[in-house]
Structure formats: C-alpha cells, structure tokens
Image: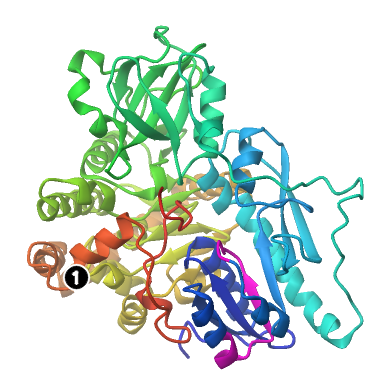
Amino acid sequence: MSIHEPGPGAGQSLRIMLLCSAFNGLTQRVWLDLREQGHHVTVQLALGEAVIREAAHAFTPDLILCPFLKERVPQDVYEHFKTIIIHPGRTGDRGPSSLDWTILQGDEEWGVTALEASEVMDGGDIWHTALYERDTTMRKGVLYNNASADAALACVQAVVAHFPAYRAGTWRPTPLDEGDPSVLGRERPSMPRQARAVDLTADSAEQALLKILASDGVPGAPVRFTNVPGTYRAYDAHLESAGPRLAPGDVGAWREDAVLVGTASGNLWIGHLKASGSVKLPATQVLGEHLSREQEWPLAPQDEPDGLTYQPVTYRRSGRVGTLAWTLYNGAMSTAQLRRLQAAVAHAAADDTDVLVVMGGPDAFSNGIHLNVIEASATPAREAWENINAINDVIYDLLNMPEKLIITAFGGNAGAGGVILGLAGDIVLARAGTVFNPHYRSMGLYGSEFWTRLLPSRVGPGRARELTDACLPVSAQMARRIGLVDEVLPRSWGTFVAHVQGWAEHFARLEQLAAQLALKAERRAQLDAVKPLAAHRAEELAQMSGNMFGDDSGFALARRHFVHKVKPTRTPGNVAIHRLAPEDADLGVAAD
C-alpha cells in the first residue's frame, strides 16, 4: 500500500475538492487529514472561473472546501456544489485582511469560521466557528501556521462531521445575523498602506512592532530610516529592552541578519527588509553598505541576555542536557546563517553534556537552503553551491558526535534539506500537526545533505524513492508509521517543549545513555561498511553540480518562480499536486 493512499476512515467517505489559491501548509494539513480519514480528495488551484467550473463538474464532489482562497467561487459552482469557505476570522468577520487587523489591534481572542460561499463575500451561513487565544507577540505567518491553522482544521473536521446530517435534512447551518450581540465580527476593508506604514520618529517600538507583525509575509510594513536612503518593506521584528538609546529613525547597530533601529520610544530589531525592485532578504544584506564593523553588537548563542532581544540561535544547558534551538525566518537557511549554526554546533559538541537536543521554532524547523538569498546573488549558482555545502557541513558535524545522543525535535514544518537535517538525530520527535516535504525534485534539484543515507536508513530504500519521486507532503502521524520519526508529541507548544525535555532527561540517565550510544555506534559501523559518509556526499554533490551550474533540471526557473511567487498556470492532474512547490509563510499571496 502506498503511504499516500487514503486510509480506511471511520465514517462515510466523501468526494471532496479542495479549491485553493496555493497548496500552502494549511491546505497540505487539510489534504492529509481528510485522506487519512478515508475521503477521496482532489486539489484544484483557483486558476480562473472556467477552470474551476470545469474541474468541479469533472470531479463531481460532494463537498468543496476552500481552506486558503483569495478568489471568488463562481456562483453557478457554489449553487450546484455545496462550497464552504474557511475564513480566518470570528463569526461575522468579513474582508481580506482579517489576521492583519486582529494583530494590529491587539485582539487577544480570535477564531476561524467555516461558512457557505454566497453572493456576499464571507457572508454565507455558518457551519462552525473555532476560537483561540492569540499570542499577541506572534507575527502573522507564525499565527497562520499554528493557532489559526489548528482552528481551521477544527472547522474542516466539523463541516465534514455535519455534512451527512445536512444532506439528510436533519441539520442546518446558522444564518449570519449581524444584529445578534454575540456576533463580534464585522466587515473590514483591505488594510491600506497608511495603516501599515511605520514612522520610526513617531511610533513607539511596540506600535512599530505591531505594524510589522501584522504585515508579515505580504505586503510587509513600509518604513524609512533617517540615516539610510530609500524606502523599504520591513519584516521579522523583535523588541530590544537593553542597550544604548538610539535616535528615532536611525539604524544604529546590527547583529547577524538584523539591524537595530531607534523609534519614538525604545529600540527595535528588524530581521528582514525588501528594497524596491528586489526580494525579501536579511536586513544586514540589504543595508550592508551602510553598516560598519564598529556597529556590530554580537551575542553568542550561549549568552543569556537580560530582557528582550534578537537571538535567532540559542544554546542552553540543563544538567547533562544541552539544547541548541533556532528560530530562522520562514525556516530558510542561508550560507551565513549555517556557518554561524555550525559554530554553535561546535560549541555544543565541546560542552560536557551527554544529550544534545536540536530543535527549531513553532513556525518552521527548516526548509533547507535560502532561495531568496541565492536568487539575489550576483552568481546564484555559486551561492547555491556554497549554501548546500554549508548545510552539509552542519549535518556532518552532527553525525560525528559519537559521545552524545542527539535528539531532534521538529516543532514546525520542514521541507527538502530541512527534513534531512532533522534526520541527523539519533532519536527524532515531531510535534503533532507538523507537515514534512522530504523531497527536492519540484525545485529542480537532486538533493544533498546525506539524504541518500539518512532517508533510506529511516524508511527503507523503496519508501525513500516514493517520498522523493511523488513530491507529496507527509503528516506527523504518517511519518511515525513509516519510521521517518520515532514519536509524535502534543500540539501545544509548551507541552511539546516539556515532553522533549522529558525525553532528553530520560536518556541522559546513565543506563539509558550507554545502551543508546552503543546502538548508535553499531548503526554507524553498519552503514559505513556499505558506503562511507564521504562517498554519499561526493555522489550527491556530483548531481547537484549539474543542477546548480548546468541547470540540467530547471532549478533556475523553479527557484525564480518560487521566490517571485509566480502563480502556476494549471493544476497538473487530479491529485497530481506534486509539481507545485509548497508555499512559504508568505501564505501564497503575490507580493505587491
């Protein structure tokens, strides 16, 4: 049985079409969940009314679900097929900037609503609303991929559960009554540029932070600096509670990818910027010519600052357990970031601990090499080559710690080389709801990161071929069933972190550790006897050289389309979504 065949399901099987603007992380979660329940699910990109109409009548779905849709559904389609929109807002909320407004206004509770497609945008009958408490410090992309995605999945599950009774006439959705005092949502316009624009000379650090958080992904928050020319879009902001007070509007310091700017009250780190006509890049790369070495404000991963700051990679020790954690924007890893991560790995290796936990943040564990940085480089092929070798070096160093047990904790989604990076762990844990895309082919790459050893050693050669050839997502539960991960831990972030620490402390006990390290040495010897690590690397890089320098599989065009969010012109086949590159946290919306 193929790992992507529908499961047996517990109830009535439905024919469900997912109509979406992009096969993003949320749509992938919904697709995986519905198929595991045994439903027959197809994916159709919203490529125009004629395409939608033709696809719906060809598939004849019982139900059309729209987990991520910016376009209108044709009236004749939603009148003929029951069509449910999954809207990221509370009951009564209408408009395209739902998450943007709730972040900017600081709402502590928000929700997702499942409602029928109708003539009035977001005004149809309500099938379900799932509420959640919102972390007010969370940027839009992270919120979308976590609490909002969880609530969206709950709405999808409720719709599917209600559908048999709806079809039998024993259950009906609730019409929207905007006069009902319990309906807290309201119609709101698309957020205008002036609401997003950051004025560093007038806004406080907290006000500027909210604007950047709300504009994360697309379109970014417009910003100007007093001592640097040009207008930029800002992303990836973090408060700074220490250090010298900077003049409002000034860029006054930098650390790794981020620049420190002054506001009307307090300082703020900005991690990513987008200049006019360019792509989103690390802020220090964008403003490099305006920064001096004297302005660097370094902070090592092992340093523990007082208060709020920008520290994308941290190393903390508790007893015999060391934890190396990172929160890299959208999970992309540039050459420079990986060289810093490699230094942190070396520090962790030298520490006299027994167990090393390696984990990413709740947004993304890793999506491998940094395509934006590569695309913006003067010589993209050379930068891609440096990037792939840098991630190879990090993985090589993790694989060569015979005296430590390494536990990988996938706290967020992972793709391509990011999945393989996690497989460098001796024990691999995943947070429930995590989506894995362990393939490269849709980006025109053969892949490296020692995947030809690490993936088959986990799932076997046959499944390794299936995963890399089919280019389809894998859920956390499916990953556990096939051996890609060892255990799935609770979805709640705090509970997940506590469970990871519990696993680490368990194996740090001497009797557990000795047995695990002996097993680790035995596995390594067996694999090396078949083919040493150096041979895997050489063979993979020989293929990647042709991909990157010879462009023999379309890497340049695939990369360009991904970076610039070029919308596909067709959905290739019924469920043949394998040619679509998963969207990043930009939520699949074209940048303006």
Q: Amino acid at mark 1?
A: Gly
Indicate the position of residue 423 as horizontal and vertical percent values.
Answer: 35, 61
Query: Looking at the rendering, which quadrant does residue 304 occupy?
Result: top left
Residue 121 position within the rendered picture, expressed as x and y whole percent measured from the top left: 69, 61
Of the pair 456 and 310, the residue shown nearer to us? 310
Which quadrant of the view contains residue 560? bottom left
Q: Nearer the viewer, residue 113 or 92?
A: 92
Residue 350: image quadrant is top left
In the image, the segment drawn in magenta is 56-71
Residue 509 shows in the view: yes
Circle 1 sits in a helix, a strand or a loop, which is it?
loop
Residue 541 picture location, percent across and down? 12, 64
Total marks shown come to: 1
Residue lying at 87% horizontally and 65% vertically, measured from the top left: 174
- Spot occupied by residue 398 in the image (x, y as percentages of width and height): 27, 50
Would residue 370 be seen by someone viewing this image from the given angle? no
Q: Does 72 sit above or below residue 82?
A: above
Q: Is residue 522 left or right of residue 235?
A: left
Is residue 529 found left or right of 295 in the rendered image? Answer: left
Q: Is residue 435 above or below residue 55?
A: above
- Residue 63 lies in magenta, yes or no? yes
Residue position marked by numbered label 1 in the rendering: 554
The structure residue drawn at horizontal position 51% and vertical position 47%, both measured from the top left corner, is: 141
149 sits left or right of 158 in the view: left
Q: Residues within 10 Å of mark 1 (few under 14, many from 20)?
A: some
**Which residue shows up at 44% across the image and 65% down it?**
436
Residue at 70% x, 85% y is: 80
Colouring used for the render: rainbow
Query: Residue 574 or 30: which is nearer the viewer?
Result: 574
User: Does 315 appear in magenta?
Assistant: no
**In this rendering, is residue 87 above or below 31?**
above
Front one among 463 and 77: 77
